[in-house]
Image: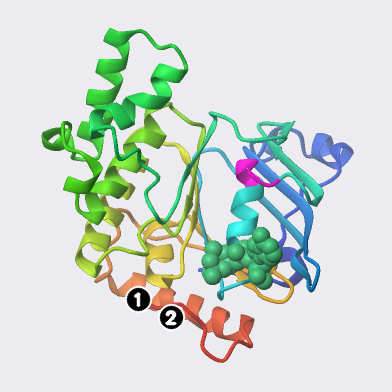
Amino acid sequence: MTIVTGASAQPVSPPESAQQVAGAIAQPAPLLALRHIRKHFRTKRHDTLALDDVSLEVRPREFICIVGPSGCGKSTLLNIAAGIDTDYEGEAMFEGVPITGTARERAVVFQEPALFPWLNVRANVEFGLKLRGVPKEQRREIVDRHLALVNLTRFDRAYVHELSGGMKQRAQLARGLAVEPHALLMDEPFAALDAQTRDELQLELQSVWARIGTTVLFVTHNVREAVILGDRVVVMSPSPGRIKSIIEVNLERPRTPDDHAVADLAAAVRYELQNASETPEPRYAI
Ligand SMILES: Nc1ncnc2c1ncn2[C@@H]1O[C@H](COP(=O)(O)OP(=O)(O)OP(=O)(O)O)[C@@H](O)[C@H]1O
Ligand SMILES: [Mg+2]
């Protein structure tokens, strides 16, 4: 286990010249680079510094989990990466290009499934493809493939109100993946699910990720979930939101909640979190 703390927990790229000197041994260019992000929310009564000098680089195909106490800026950071929020100081780059708004390359999955209730599962998954003008036959093939990927083939004609919470999240995942994004940004996608469904979806997400190899940025309050899913776990501290430490998870996959090594590492992450938070009742669990 490697825990990087303090200033070095914010792995900023070396200046270009230093990178060139490093030459062939240099890391692959980051897919997502957030550099010195500072974000204020200003209202009539409050000025909240939500993020203060946050830097994070995510490599292609990496699975990054972000944990931290409520209000530490996890969603704010994810929204900046998604291009939903473009009002901040610092630099947010995706594939070497500044992020100026939302884009097909970055699909977002929220805690509450944002499915269209008037469309069935198939039509929901097909929606983004239609918008992009993908021909009908190709759409059918892509939708079939993604419904199979998330085990929803049997429910393709069901409407949203006929689905369980887990099925809705599977449908949302299929819809996000169908447009073949280069990164999947997930904000507590399993938080509203019961423990058993959550375990199932953690396993499924690992298998989907292993098969399609997309890059994932995943926000969660559940420390064990972060260790099960992540290549690295980013621990944030609140007021203002900063990266406290980054923990490498070098455990074999697939991982399950019952693995001893998962439990041990989750305890270490929880320890980091406890030190990160001065909130009396932090909202996270292992
Ligand atoms: N639209 C907004 N207007 C004003 N303040 C905001 C707004 N959105 C977030 N904040 C503030 O910014 C800080 C970070 O909020 P954010 O939602 O990113 O936290 P979070 O880590 O995702 O919390 P949670 O775990 O509860 O989802 C909080 O202090 C919050 O009150
Ligand atoms: Mg949030």
Q: Which mark is residue 267?
A: 2
The C terminus sits in image quarter: bottom left
Question: What type of secondary structure mainly makes up the magenta span?
Answer: loop
Residue closest to the eye, 234 or 144 = 144
Residue underneath mark 1: 263
At 82% from the left and 50% from the top, the residue drawn is: 90
Q: Which mark is residue 135?
A: none
Question: Residues in magenta?
Answer: 81-85
Secondary structure category for the residue under label 1: helix
For residue 19, side relative to residue 222 (left or right): right
Residue 50: image location, x then y, percent: 72, 66
For label 1, being within 8 Å of ligand 1 is answered no
Residue 158: image location, x then y, percent: 16, 37
Q: Does residue 42 appear in this view?
A: yes
At 43% from the left and 80% from the top, the residue drawn is: 267
Residue 277: image location, x then y, percent: 61, 83
Residue 258: image location, x then y, percent: 24, 71
Instruction: Give the residue furthest to the left.
Output: 154
